[in-house]
Image (cartoon, rainbow, N blue to C red):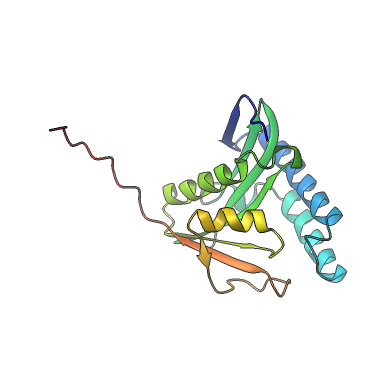
């Protein structure tokens, strides 16, 4: 895929940002509903998930707001093309949620960039680890998570999909750059 001229990722802060986030998240939900090959689970599970998702979107920023959460928007050439969120799971652990890239921008590296942005934000907020869940059919996302150092972990919440996968990553503060003088 040809990369857009200008890619940016920024923290959602304004009312306009939350409107964009709602739009992207509802688009993500529509995509999940349309692609039942990805969400290959019972319709009853889908209905509960859809209802929960609508409540989450209606309550934005909700758990993704300050001081312990964050939601980032991704733009390509000034147009919104993706998002990703971070919410607290307690004092020391955060959860990465709702990474979505519009189909037209997939394969551009934005999923990886959003994942890194969320990990760095979790570190900056003082979290010691991050966790996430995904479906086994989301192979591109799983490949990104694994390549970014995420490892399988035990279930940390009662996910309604029996074969959902759970990943985690320990965070260490970034070491300051070495200031050695050349010899």
Quarter of the image for residue 19 reads top right
Farthest residue toward the left? 183
Which of the 4 quarters of the picture holds residue 22? top right
Q: Is residue 153 visible?
A: yes
**Residue nearest the observer in this picture, 13 or 95:** 95
Considering only vertical position in the picture, is 10 above or below 66? above
**Would residue 39 be found to the left or right of residue 3 on screen?**
right
Q: What residue do we see at 80% from left, 66% from top?
A: 40
Q: Kindly identify the residue that appears in the image at 60 percent across and 26 percent down.
A: 6
* Residue 30 in the image, given as x and y percentages of width and height: 83, 50
Quadrant location of the N terminus?
top right
Decide if residue 4 is on the left or right side of residue 129. Answer: right
Residue 87 in sight: no
**Position above or below: 82 against 99:** above
| Depicted 15 relative to depicted 5: above or below | below
Q: From the viewer's perspective, tell me whether residue 160 is left or right of residue 142.
A: right
Q: Nearer the viewer, residue 36 or 174?
A: 36
Q: Nearer the viewer, residue 7 or 53?
A: 7
Residue 88 drawn at (x, y percent): 54, 58
In the rendered view, does 166 fall on the left or right side of 103? left
Residue 48 appears in which quarter of the rendering? bottom right
User: What residue occupies the far front of the structure in this picture?
Assistant: 1
Q: Residue at x 59, y 56 (%)?
A: 143
Q: Position of residue 34 (x, y in %)?
A: 86, 53
At 71% from the left and 75% from the top, the residue drawn is: 162
Percent x, y of residue 183: 12, 33
Number of numbered discs visible in the structure rendering: 0
């Amino acid at each position: 895929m040809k990369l857009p001229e200008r890619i940016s990722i920024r923290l959602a802060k304004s009312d306009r940002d939350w409107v964009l986030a709602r739009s992207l998240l509802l688009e993500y939900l529509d995509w999940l509903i349309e692609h039942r090959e990805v969400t290959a689970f019972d319709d009853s599970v889908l209905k509960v998930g859809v209802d929960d998702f609508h409540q989450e979107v209606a309550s934005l920023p909700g758990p993704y707001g300050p001081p312990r959460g964050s939601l980032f928007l991704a733009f390509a050439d000034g147009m919104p093309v993706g998002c990703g969120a971070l919410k607290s799971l307690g004092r020391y652990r955060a959860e990465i949620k709702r990474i979505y890239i519009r189909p037209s921008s997939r394969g551009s590296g934005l999923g990886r960039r959003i994942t890194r942005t969320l990990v760095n934000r979790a570190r900056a907020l003082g979290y010691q680890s991050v966790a996430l869940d995904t479906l086994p059919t989301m192979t591109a996302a799983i490949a990104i998570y694994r390549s970014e150092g995420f490892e399988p972990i035990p279930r940390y919440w009662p996910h309604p999909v029996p074969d959902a996968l759970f990943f985690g990553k320990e965070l260490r503060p970034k070491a300051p750059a070495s200031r050695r003088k050349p010899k």
